Amino acid sequence: MKSLWNEADAARCEDELQLRVYTSRLLGSNPELVLHGGGNTSVKIRKTNLVGEEEDILYVKGSGWDLATIEAPGFTPIRMAHLLKLAELETLSDSQMVNELKTQQTVASAPTGSVEAILHAVLPFKYVDHTHANAVVTITNLPGGEERIREIYGDEVVIIPYVMPGFDLARMVAQCYAAEASANTRGLVLMNHGIFSFADAARDSYECMIELVERAEQYLKRHNAWEIPRSGVESDKPLAVEQVARLRWEISQAAGAPMLLSMDRSPEVLSFCRRDDLDRISQQGPATPDHVIRTKRLPMLGRDVSSYVKAYGDYFAVNAPHARQEVTMLDPAPRVILDPELGMLTVGRSSKEAGINADIYRHTMQIIQRAELADAWTALSADKIFEVEYWELEQAKLRKGDSAPEMQGEVALVTGAASGIGRACVESLLARGAAVVGLDLDDSIEIMLERSDFLGLTCDVTDQAAVKLALENGVQRFGGLNMLIMNAGMFPGGSRIAELDDEIWRKVMGVNLDANMALMRDCYPLLKLSPNSGKVVVIGSKNVPAPGPGAAAYSASKAALNQLARIAALEWAADGIRINTLHPDAVFDTGIWSEEVLASRAAHYAMTVQEYKTKNLLGTEISSMDVAELAAAMCGPLFAKTTAAQVPVDGGNDRVV
């Protein structure tokens, strides 16, 4: 653990709050200290208010902000005087505490301050830093953890027994610090939770944190408990995509909503999942109370997953008898699943949530294995885990509820996704909360969007092996498939039947028809296991109802695809899969319509370019996004009772009408 302080960077900070931002980001950049919004920091600043009075203000990290990316507005200013009065109360519920924090903010638009704001206030130092440093958490979860902490730090830290974050913890810290702090005290260690450092200078508080954590790391190294042995195992079995999709379906049923399922089959993860003692070490609890993730082991490939999903629903009733209190119960679905072949599967309502769970549990694996090397892994009791998971503030959040995006937890596959209608479909689906796998011949698809809910894969849809691999990659990333948008196709140059080349005919049929038939066949088992039912949208063409001369191969291939979709609607309806077709026409913001081509075609009809682009009954221009929005809507609840429909997106065409 090394200090990242840079004097030149620090010199650019204009005030104390900017220094607070700077050192907070240094802490947040190190995953050994902070993960995904964990930890918090603060600074106490004297300010003059609007009526000319001076008052001390605590700027503490606000809810929803991450130390790695925090900015000045991410710190909530709260009046110190009131916080110190609150600290003297005998009791204060956490909901009352949050209300008091909100009423004492000096900026109404600021986020809600950390639930540890009172704790930061009672520590008599200008800068306070708090992290969940892996090394410290590891040691506090060892047998005799408190004695080990005393051995490492002596009287340089005050040790606080585990208390759930909130008012009770703040009161405990105030009492213990007043009773035990000495001239040597530089920090606090919260058992099973983390570590605090503090000082009157930003650099001193930050570098104190680094030094204290480094000493914990050195302790583990001296006990041969730092480097985790790697067995180098790799999965030697192909991924059973249908089994993973079924697992996702079962979890979604238990959760009462579609969930995403992300897989990690790396050698490090498989090595952990194949430990002989996995049942013991994986079921004890989280590394810290901030990282409560319901974890379940899937003992053997191919078992009925509903049995262990249901079993987990009974967990608290068995291990925490007071779970029968009047509380809003969380859904019983686990958020981490461990399997010797599948590796680690993490569950979330969104790809971001699943990714956070994955990152947290990877670090939990490290902590557990280092603890086992040092002695033995111990964790919070089931009662303590229950207190955190069914915390008053979490209950209030559950009762309030959040409006989820329409397609949250669902997965879409879009072909021809790098440009035009395909790219627009990707954007429409992402905007509705779906996770999207995009396939395209153009390898720019792989870097098209840098976000966790999009997976871009270079793929020739006529290569069935490549398509199967793409589906496998999509299942590894998101767990299954809900929606299929078949957009990839080719439009060859005009050629009348008398001059039509056999090779061109076969190529057009191969892309527009054969590839889509194979894709539908391969996607069917996944769509059948789709939470919220499977949805398919075929991007057809105006040429299906109204073909034109010189487009025999294209028109015939699209007509055959349309007929294939109608048959699929008949065959798949019993599985709850609906399939509908869109027939766009004159969509000019795609790759094949350059300015030169548009000008040429407009001139052919003795029109301006704008007149040519709007030569339909409504006199309107059709864009890729117009088609995409309707394609996405066809996958939504508005079309839940519609299948085998053919809908034009053409502004009205007299030949079709």
Image (tube, rainbow, N blue to C red):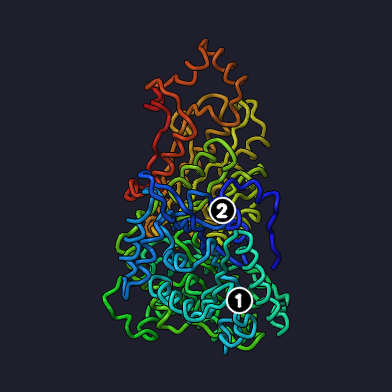
Residue 633: quadrant of the picture? top left
Which sits earlier in the primary sequence, circle 1 or circle 2? 2
Identify the residue at image location x=36%, y=26%: 657
Foreground residue among 243 and 401: 401
Q: CA distance from mark 1 to mark 2?
A: 27 Å
Task: Identify whether 280 is placed above or below 94.
Answer: below
Q: Left or right: where does residue 153 sit relative to residue 400?
A: right
The disc at residue 184 is: 1
Q: Secondary structure at mark 1?
A: loop
Task: Identify whether 401 is placed above or below 211.
Answer: above
**Percent position (x, y) of residue 509?**
59, 41
Task: Identify whether 78 is placed above or below 88.
Answer: above
**Percent position (x, y) of residue 544?**
47, 34
Foreground residue among 570 and 131: 131
**Percent position (x, y) of residue 610?**
49, 17
The disc at residue 21 is: 2
Circle 1 packing at 10 Å, graded few (<14), some (14-19), many (20+), is few
Amino acid type indicated by mark 1:
Asn
Identify the residue at image location x=29%, y=73%: 327
**Percent position (x, y) of residue 656?**
40, 27
Q: Secondary structure at mark 2?
A: helix
| Marks 1 and 2 close (CB-CB < 8 Å) | no
Foreground residue among 106 and 542: 106
